[in-house]
Amino acid sequence: MTKSTLAGKFADRLRSSREERELSQSDLARLTGLQPSAIAHFEAERRKPSFDNIRVLAAALKVTTDYLLGSEGKSAMAFKDEHKLSKTDRDRIQDIINVMVKDKK
């Protein structure tokens, strides 16, 4: 469910980022030092996280705070997974981007 409020976007993006990484709320709590109930409350919009909590959650999920807060789209998040690719694959992608940019000129 997509929500338009800041809290709703945060809750949705927190949950989807956690699920994309196949983490349970308890797993994420262990990675962040937060209580599992805090993660559940954030995802259910029953509690608002502090900025420090947002930073810790973003780091654990390997996303930006802007993404969690709804300021950054999915396309920017593709680059967060870049480290999972081999150097050869990253070079190929850069070549494709260069060709596409050149074609636009």
Image (tube, rainbow, N blue to C red):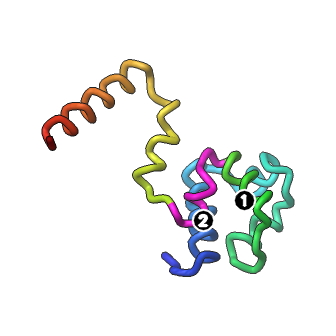
Q: Which residue is mark 1?
A: 54
Q: Which residues are magenta?
A: 61-71
Earlier in the chain: of badge 1 and badge 2, it is 1
Specify the quadrant of the image occupied by residue 86: top left
The answer to whether marks 1 and 2 mark residues whose Cβ atoms lie closer than 8 Å is yes
Please provide percent x and percent y for residue 7. Answer: 64, 76
**65 part of magenta stretch:** yes
**104 part of magenta stretch:** no
Please tell me whether residue 75 is drawn above or below residue 93 in the rendered image. below
Specify the quadrant of the image occupied by residue 65: bottom right
Q: How many marks?
A: 2
Left or right: residue 9 versus residue 103 is right
Q: Residue extending furthest front?
A: 105
The residue lying at 60 percent from left, 51 percent from top is 64
Quadrant in the picture for the C terminus: top left
Q: Secondary structure at mark 2?
A: loop
Q: Which residue is mark 2?
A: 69
